[in-house]
Every structure is written in C-alpha cells, then in structure tokens.
Amino acid sequence: MTLVKIVVVFLMTISGFGVSMAAVYTVGDSAGWTSMGAVDYQKWADQKDFHVSDTLVFKYSKQFHNVKQVSQKDFVSCDATSPMATYEIGSDSITPKIVDHYYFLCGIPGHYQAGQKVEILVTPTSLRHTPTLVLAPTPSPSQTPATTSTSTDKNATPSLYFSFNSFALTVLVFCLAIIGFAF
C-alpha cells in the first residue's frame, strides 16, 4: 500500500469515530421501575437525550409490576386496557426503531396514579452529540464578569466549537481531492 492509500484509509477510519454508539438507559436509574415514589420518571426522561437504536431497560419485580406501551391518548387517560405492547419479564429491553414519542406505564391498578409512567421522546441518531473541543478565549482579569451564570439547557452548545468528526471528514475530502480519487 502506498503512503497516500494508508493516509486515506486512516482518515476514513477516524472519521467514523464521530458516529455515536447506541446508549442503554435503565429507566429510573438505580431505583428501576417502581411505584414507590422514589423516581419522578418524567423528570428522569427530560434530563436524557434518547435516540433511535438506544435501549430502554425496565427493571422491576414482575410479581408487582409490568410495562405497557400505550398510545398518547391512553397514556393521558391512564388506560392500560389496549396496550400496543406488554412486557412482564422484570428486565425488559426496548429499542425504539423510529423517531417518535413513546408512552409507557405500569398496568397494575393505582401505579399510574403513583407516578409509574413515562413519556420518552426519541430523536434521530444524527442529532446525537459528538465529542467537541471547545475553543474559548481566556478573559483577562479586567474582562472577568462580576457574576456568572450557567445554562440549564441540556442542548446548549458553545458559540465557538470544533467537532472532531467534521474535521476528520473535511480532511478526508481534502486528501481525496488532492490525490484526485486515484487509488
């Protein structure tokens, strides 16, 4: 292999590193899927970014709980009588395949009212955050603001950033242009 081919293969390989791997989320984290009021499931979900092909794992005692995927209408009305899917194993993995809102609740009477319900918004994988190197100027002591604030927006991005994936792709295209696509 010539040096040019090696460089091109290397750049093609590193450009793939920006592609995100699917994530696995245990619903409710260490508390799991419970009606004991230990978890605000909607707050838990709102603090996450769910993407197509991520996996949701519902962990619970199958003697006391289940998971029912329902329509938005049934979710709002707490109606578990016509679920789209029912899970009863106690460690159920669900992998959304399309961008959509997904609605889950426990079908045991009273558990929905106790908060055992969650709406999950699944977005395209392409919107997954890739690692970035933030380039921010260091303020001089005279420019340091008297007060600071932090953003609570989970989707906030720095005003000036450099994405490794974009850089690798740019370098790849540049190298291919230089060698004239001749392999």
Image: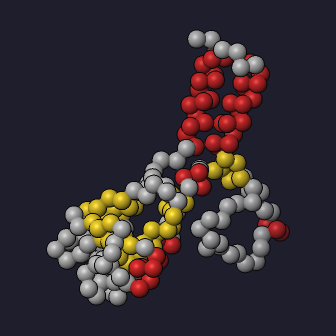
Q: Is residue 129 left or right of residue 138?
A: left
- The single residue placed furthest to the right in the displayed view is 142
- The single residue placed furthest to the top in the displayed view is 1
Note whether 37 is above or below 168 in the view shown: below
Q: Is residue 101 left or right of residue 139?
A: left
Q: Is residue 50 left or right of residue 8?
A: left
Q: Nearest the camera: 30 or 53? A: 53
Rendering quarter of residue 26? bottom left
Q: Nearest the camera: 49 or 71? A: 71
Residue at the image position 78 percent from the left and 62 percent from the top: 139
Coloration mode: secondary structure
Residue at the image position 19 percent from the left and 77 percent from the top: 64
Residue 73 in the image: x percent, y percent? Answer: 45, 79
Q: Is residue 92 left or right of residue 144?
A: left
Rendering quarter of residue 112? bottom left
Residue at the image position 68 percent from the left and 53 percent from the top: 134
Q: Quadrant of the C terminus?
A: top right
Q: Quadrant of the N terminus?
A: top right
